[in-house]
Image: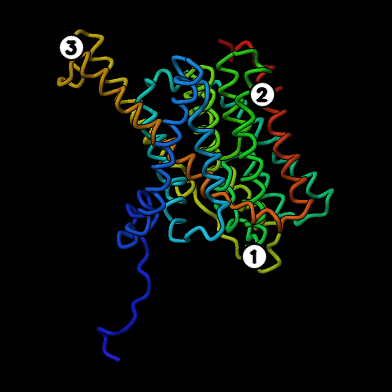
Amino acid sequence: MSKNNTVQPNQPLTKWEQSIFGVSVREIPGLLPGLIVASLLAWASINISDFIGKDLLGFTKSPISAVMIAIILGLLIRSVPFLPKFLLPGFRFSVKKVLRFGIILLGIRLTMFDVLKLGIVGVPIVAVCIIGALLITSWINNKLNLPERLGTLIAVGTSICGVTAILAASPAIDAEEEETAYAVAVITLFGLFATLAYPHLAHSIFSGQVRQIGIFLGTAIHETAQVVGAGQMYADIFDQPIVLDIATITKLVRNVFMAFVIPVMAIYYSQKTKDKNYDGKKPGFFKLFPMFVLGFLFMAIIRSVGDMGISRGQQAFGLLGPETWTNAIQIIKKSAEFLLVIALAGVGLNTDFKSFKILGLKPLLVGLIASASVGMISYFAILLMAGFVSY
């Protein structure tokens, strides 16, 4: 066989391909069908929300969240038998990459002063929630005699960063594929429930205190997509957009902890199994650091610099007058919100309830206790720090 006819192995993704698309440039067309479906579903959800809330009920702002509609419609579509498999890559792209683009653009809503003010308060609460969830989940997992690594994956998924943390921790602790799949299914199930229920629960238990509600949503819900979705739902229903900002910043702080916790766990397991041919990988800090956090901060810096120019009676960046700068911010905000609805439509479209049938009761019980524990720890930690997290 000639060299020209030799089948070439798949080339590794370049850094920019991995960061922006998650696939090679050649595979981008394969993302479009699913991405188009998620985008149309997001557009339809926004219009349905407006029609029900404004046209039928007569509100000036619809109390029916487009995010909630997008998730529910996505779940219904995904349950349709024989759904074309070529749509799935686009659904996954919506959840993983479109979400991150939306979060980056959300940074334009805040100045760096706002980010620091909101983020610093959440750090001790985030730390307490992570430590508490890891300890409680590991304890209940041992009591139920489940594999230790399965409990660890559920614990990191619940306490830190959902599926992303599970997939990062899995090779670090040398987990089996089945354990990883079980943990992902558990986190998806309870996180989805929290996304839909916690905005209403938080409004009730915190009596409308927006900072407390935002921190609760940011610490008690698992996935970044789920946190942002819950924050957007609260903003839609109760007309408090600041909750989305607080929940997002709190979750980004939580995501950063992944870069510290998972290497520690890798070292723990390598020491524990050093006499047993342990082959788990020890990921480094920069490999685990969620880089889209830097994008969010970069947009906040842009907002800060632009606002500074306007406040001095000059133009933003020497180019944009006050009205133009305000309009630019509004366009970016609306773009971010639409991207988030696409991402949450992708959450519904990407959730296959058939995968939950193989779990059995014990992993579900661990996931339930882990989810309830992190929620209760978050609640009591916020109450203890009520003087610092109230307005």
Query: In the drawing, does residue 15 fall left or right of residue 210?
Result: left
Q: Which percent across, then down, holds residue 196? A: 60, 32
Q: Which residue is mark 3?
A: 314
Q: Where on the picture, by quarter, is residue 325?
A: top left
| Residue occupying image coordinates x 64% and y 56% | 355
Q: Residue furthest left?
A: 319
Which of the pair 156/74 is nearer the observer? 74
| Residue occupying image coordinates x 79% and y 51% | 362
| Residue occupying image coordinates x 45% and y 34% | 45
Sooner in the amino-acid sequence: mark 2 or mark 3: 2
Q: Which percent across, then down, holds residue 55? A: 44, 20
Amino acid type indicated by mark 2:
Leu
Quick one: SS at disc 1? loop
Q: Which percent across, then down, holds residue 224? A: 52, 38
Query: In the drawing, does residue 145 fall left or right of residue 301?
Result: right
Instruction: Look at the picture and state if 20 lies above or below 249.
Output: below
Query: In the drawing, does residue 38 fall left or right of residue 298?
Result: right
Which of the pair 222/265 is nearer the observer? 222
Q: CA distance from mark 2 to mark 3?
A: 45 Å
Sooner in the amino-acid sequence: mark 2 or mark 1: 2
Q: Which mark is residue 278?
A: 1
Instruction: Look at the picture and state if 107 lies above or below 264.
Output: above
Which of the pair 97/68 is nearer the observer? 68
Amino acid type indicated by mark 1:
Tyr
